[in-house]
Image: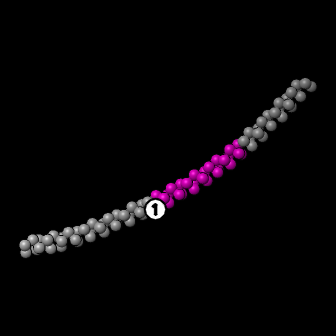
Amino acid sequence: MHNRIKKLVKMSALVLPLSLAVGCATTGDLEKVRAMANDAKAAADAAAASAGEAKTMAAQANQKADEARSCCEELRAGQERMFKRSMRK
């Protein structure tokens, strides 16, 4: 019985530091994962902001393109009217 207690004490002496080391490593790993998650969230937030800016710029570009097309169509119509008038004379 006395040997059993000694073995149990020895095993506890080995297992306890090992389990604490594993626990610390797990905590460290958890902190790394949290840091990676925070970095990923920050990158995703930045990408979303950039996408929002790009969407706004695209909408502005579309508006300017529509304005340019309208202007071009007005000029073309005016040229056609002038050409038709010149042909009548």
Residue 4 is left or right of residue 46, and the answer is left
Question: Dot 1: few (<14), some (14–19), or many (≥20) neighbours within 10 Å?
Answer: few
The residue positioned 64% from the left and 47% from the top of the image is 58
The residue positioned 15% from the left and 74% from the top of the image is 9
Q: Nearer the viewer, residue 66 or 31?
A: 31
Percent of width and height locating residue 54 = 60, 51
Residue bearing the label numbered 1: 38
User: What range of the chain is rendered magenta?
Assistant: 38-65
Say above or below: 85 vs 19.
above
Q: Quadrant of the C terminus?
A: top right
User: Is residue 61 covered in magenta?
Assistant: yes
The residue positioned 7% from the left and 72% from the top of the image is 1
Callout 1: SS: helix
The residue at the far top in this view is 88
Kind of residue sitting beneath label 1: Asn
Q: Nearer the viewer, residue 25 or 59?
A: 25
Quarter of the rendering containing residue 17: bottom left
Percent of width and height locating residue 88 = 90, 24
